[in-house]
Amino acid sequence: MAEQQQQLPRRQRVYRQRRDVFNEYSDDELIKRFRMNRAGIITVADLVRDKLQSRTERNQPLSPETKVAITLRYLATGKMQQCSSDDFGTSQATISRVITQTIDALSEPDIVTQFVKFPLTRQEVQVKQEEFMEDYRFPGVVGTIDGTHIRIVAPSVDEHLYVNRKRYHSINVQVVFDAKYRILDVLARWPGSVHDARILDESGLKALFEQNYVPAGCYLLGDSGYPCKEWLLTPYLNPLAGVQTNYNTAHKRTRCVVERGIGQLKRRFHVLHGEVRLSPEKTCKIVYVCALLHNMCKQFNIPVPINEEDEVFHDAAEGDVGADEEEPGEAEIPPNPGRPAGRNGHPFRDYIANLHFSRPVAE
């Protein structure tokens, strides 16, 4: 019997035919399927080429560009099996390995910070302030901040910590957008049960402002779930007619930037809108990769795709409430009363309101 087994001919490995998606699809078709055009995919591959390049030419290795395309297809659809159905000519196991490898490479801090970085010089801050002033007539604003929940499967460790106030498992992601819907800062590491104010309180973003790394005279806009500070202006909870009402109206219109920005991000990368079926750690890496890719798309003027699959995201992208945002008319969360630092911003808010909003801001 052993002799018969030794004499059996060795089965030859059969390779599936792979399609050349880069030459088969036009740039418009690439954007629809992968959220980037040919030049963008090559640029992303160049960022991590040394980490994605196969060490051998055996077994028909995938090129870095193909690995990036497979990963982009997953981020665009949120479905790993969709990558296989696009005829990359690889097995589901290979798809999974490629996505993990590419996400790990792109989520490294030295890669992310090339495209997602908060303005720290006077010139950089001034550009952001001028954009907000030109588009929304709210002086001094450098960015708008909010939290958004990314749905995940129930994790095996500390499962209860990831249940948010809407009773599903999530990662609570802090994000800051500028007036042109570019991401200035993103923090993805906190479970869904953690409040936005605590995330900010323990973030590096707070340290940048309070340790004077950010030039004086600029601030963020946030909702009433945040404490009011001299660098973070929130709305009046019970505004008086006149100045306070004018301020609140301008504040709400300007702060819609972050709601629209989150809508654009999730519409561009559907993986962030559905349930991510990965561990919290891997989900956080995906958030960082989507943030840097979003900013790259802004840099290359690649539009947010609109098609039948994207209709569910239309309202959020236009500034309406998304699936994980607060419903209109929901009770506002007052600032934490036990924080002296939270009260320090109230006189400054009064100063800004009286200085700039004695009259309603023209549309």
Image (cartoon, grey):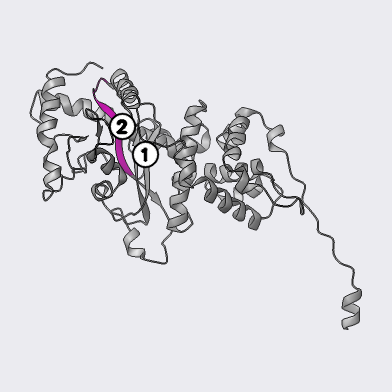
Is 9 displayed left or right of 312 in the figure? Answer: right
**Picture layout, residue 127 above or below residue 233:** above
**Residue found at x 26% / y 43%:** 206
Does residue 146 belong to the magenta stretch? yes
Is 172 displayed left or right of 2 in the figure? Answer: left
* Residue 114 visible (yes or no): yes
Q: x, y (%) of residue 305?
A: 51, 31
Crowding near pointer 1: few (<14 within 10 Å), some, many (20+)? many
Q: x, y (%) of residue 54?
A: 68, 50
Q: Nearer the viewer, residue 343 or 254?
A: 343
Dominant SS type (magenta): strand
- Determine the secondary structure under disc 2: strand
Which image quarter is the N terminus in?
A: bottom right
Q: Which mark is residue 143?
A: 2
Image: magenta residue range: 137-147
**Picture layout, residue 242 above or below residue 199:** above
Identify the residue position indicated by label 1 in the image. Answer: 185
- Determine the secondary structure under disc 1: strand
**Residue found at x 71% / y 32%:** 23
Q: Disc 1 marks which amino acid?
A: Asp
Q: x, y (%) of residue 303?
A: 50, 28
Q: CA distance from mark 1 to mark 2?
A: 9 Å
Does residue 327 belong to the magenta stretch? no
Q: x, y (%) of residue 18?
A: 74, 45
Q: Nearer the viewer, residue 362 or 41?
A: 41
Is 92 displayed left or right of 75 in the figure? Answer: right
**Picture layout, residue 55 above or below residue 210:** below
